[in-house]
Structures are given as C-alpha cells and as structure tokens.
Image (cartoon, rainbow, N blue to C red):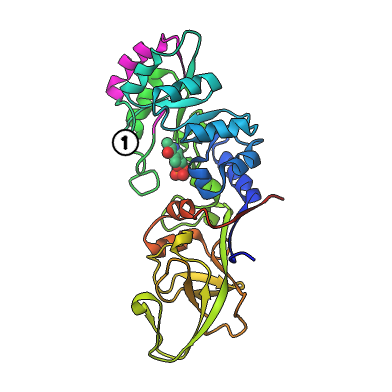
Amino acid sequence: MTRPIRADIDLTAIRHNLLVSKNKAPNAKAYAVIKADAYGHGALQVARALEDNADGFALLRLEDALALKEAGIRRPLVLLEGAFDYEELAAMAEHGIAGAFHSPYQLDWLDRLPAGLRVKGWLKINSGMNRLGFRPEVLLDILNRLKAHPALRLSAIMTHFATADDPRGIGRQWPAFAKAAADSGLPVCAANSAALFRYPETHGTFVRPGVCLYGCSPFEGQTGSELGLKPAMTLSADIIAVQNLDSGESVGYGCGFTADKPTRLGVVACGYADGYPRVAPNGTPVTVDGAPSSLVGRVSMDMLTVDLSHLPQAGIGSRVELWGPHVPLETVARHAGTISYELMCAVAPRVPRAWQDN
Ligand SMILES: *Cc1c(COP(=O)(O)O)cnc(C)c1O
C-alpha cells in the first residue's frame, strides 16, 4: 500500500510542445531548458523524450549535465550560469559541456586551463535584467580578450529578458542586445518561451524554450492550451476520508472554512509538503472523478479538503485532480498568487512520479 498521490508526466505532450515551439521559430535551433529537474518533470526522462527533436539542452548544474552524458544523452549541453568554480570549468572543457560566461572571475579561470583543453563559451550580455552578464559597453574589450584565447571557443552571445511575458515587452532590452550581437558576429541566443511566442525578431540562432515545453503559458491571463500547448503534469490524489458538516461547523486549521449549510467534504491525500501551495484559498478549482469542484478550508501539510456537496457519488477513493488537463496549472497558480513555474518546480520528492510516453 502506498499513499494515494502521484504526479503523472506525459512525455508525448512535452514532445508535442517542443514541436509547437519549433514551429514558432522554424529557423532557429531549440535548446530545451531542463533546469530544476526539467521544472519538476524529470530531466533525464524529458531529455530522452526530446532527444530526437531538441538541438540541445540547457541546464543549471554541472552534475546534472554529467549525469545526462553518463546516461547516454548525446545532444549538446549548455550550463545557463556557466561554471561556479575553476574545477567545474575544467570538467566542462573535459566533457565538452558549454557554459555561459557572465562575470570577469569566470574569464580569469580560462588562463588556468591546461594547454590543449578548450571550453565552449556562451557570452552572456546584461541587456537590462541586471542579474548576470557583461554590459554591452564592455563587449568589444571582452571580445578582444576572448576571441584569441586558446582555451575558449565562443559559440554564442546570449541575453535574458525581464519582461518578455508582460505588456512592457522587450523594447527596453532588445535594441542594445541586438547591436551587441551584430557587433560580435556570434550566433545569437535570446528567446525564452515568452519571446519565442511573441517576438520573432529575437529568435536568432538558438531559442531557449522552458515553461512552454511543460504545457504552460508564460503570459498572464492566458493558458498553455490557448497557445496550442498540452499540459504535461497531472498532480492527483485520492479522497481518504469524508466529513459531513452541519451549518456553522468548520474544517481544518484556523477554521479556514465554515459551512453556511450542510456540507459534505472530501479529505484529500495531498498537502503543502507535497508541493500544493498552502496559500491556495477557498474556491481554488479541482476536479473529483472528473467533475468540477473546489478547495475548502486551509491546506495542511499532508491533507487538503474539497467540497463534495454537489457530488453525492464521490467518496473514499475518488480521484482528485489538483492540476492537469482539467485544472490548468496556471489557474491554480493565479489563485495562489504565484506562477505555474513555481508550482511545477515545487512538487516534492515524496510524490511518486510516473512517466507515460505513447
Ligand atoms: C529558465 C531560463 C529560460 C527558460 O525560460 P522560460 O520562461 O521557462 O521559457 C531561458 N533562459 C534562461 C537564461 C533561463 O534561466
């Protein structure tokens, strides 16, 4: 017997979503972003499912890249933040893993690489996000230093957008980056999911789709289905108890819901320790055996409660979809005051995952 909760990952949907993304940017190569364990979907499973169609994979941690290589993934890999120390840089050179160079201290490590070792670098430009990257003003100095460096092969120039997903768009960042890219003569990589869907001028040589691969829209107020994407993750759990409340009775911590009429509740084997957001309020949608219902009362660590008053046939063992094809992750995220990204990454290790590929 196991606790009745699971996350089903639909690899066919992820493959479909990559093809939709590639159709949006038909002339660019697509590096599928699989950081954070492929946004909670399983980096190795996703990489295997996409290997025929993705041109490369973008990740964060060297150890994850090495694990993919070890498992036989042959597509190019790039580390979005590059090396975190000299040993990582040396390992990247040795294993042919590319990485971003965003700060002077990473460039200094190049001088220490043993003769004959060469690393592939993606030069990161800070075009206004102000997290990582060199400012466009110093581009020419850096290129002068790097283009002749025997330990480096510059393979791309990249940047990242702060507002490609909202009405402010890329106008503040794109002109400066486009000029730097043209000056550098390097292959261009700028588009995240939002820019991929909205700003064809950014497609360049490589695009970096992330959240859209997992079926979610990067845009507020628009679901992935509206962009032609298919949801990839279904989080579901069973009802393990039923409570009948009289009018005036409450459920859960803080008595977060009080019945104003006789109310039948289902207690579901999913809580915030599974990754369901504790802040999700009364009324957040779920389905129970496919029928629409909603959250009532506060989410606890290991349980949450849903309304069964209108579902007399539902009871112990009924399956509750917390998010998935019938309950868009974007909708749950909106109720919880966050974004789909955070919820998909937060599914806890104790939730068993099952991968389907048709
Ligand atoms: C995470 C990430 C992406 C993917 O972003 P999405 O919004 O999920 O498409 C692209 N580029 C960089 C540098 C990232 O860190």
Q: Is residue 210 left or right of residue 252?
A: right
Is any atom of residue 192 visible in this view? no
The amino acid type found where label 1 is placed reads Arg
Magenta span contains residue 155: yes
Q: Which residue is mark 1?
A: 131
The magenta span reads 136-159
Category of crowding for the residue at label 1, using alpha-carbon neighbours closer than 10 angstroms: few (below 14), some (14–19), many (at least 20)? few
Q: Can see residue 120?
A: yes
Image location of residue 116, percent across then percent down: 50, 9
What's the residue at 36%, 79% (across, down)? 255
Outermost residue on the front side: it is 1
Work out which residue is located at the far left of the displayed protein and give it: 137
At horizontal 51% and vertical 76% (from top left) the residue drawn is 267
Which percent across, then down, holds residue 37? 52, 44
Of 136 and 105, nearer the camera is 105
Q: Secondary structure at mark 1?
A: loop
Q: Quadrant of the N terminus?
A: bottom right
Q: Quadrant of residue 281?
A: bottom left
Q: Is residue 317 left or right of residue 259?
A: right
- The image position of residue 182, as x and y in percent, is 40, 21
- Quadrant containing ligand 1 reads top left
Residue visible at 38% across and 12% down? 111
Give the answer, above or below, for where 243 lies relative to 132: below
**Foreground of the two, 62 or 97:** 62
Task: Please tell me whether residue 68 is drawn above or below residue 289 in the rendered image.
Answer: above
Q: Position of residue 326 (x, y in %)?
A: 57, 65
Residue 221 lies, with reference to residue 38, above or below; the image says: below
Query: Which residue is pictured at 57% across the width and 34% down the height?
Result: 67
Front position in the image: 5 or 118: 5
Compared to 219, does 60 lie above or below?
above
Residue 306 located within the stretch drawn in magenta: no
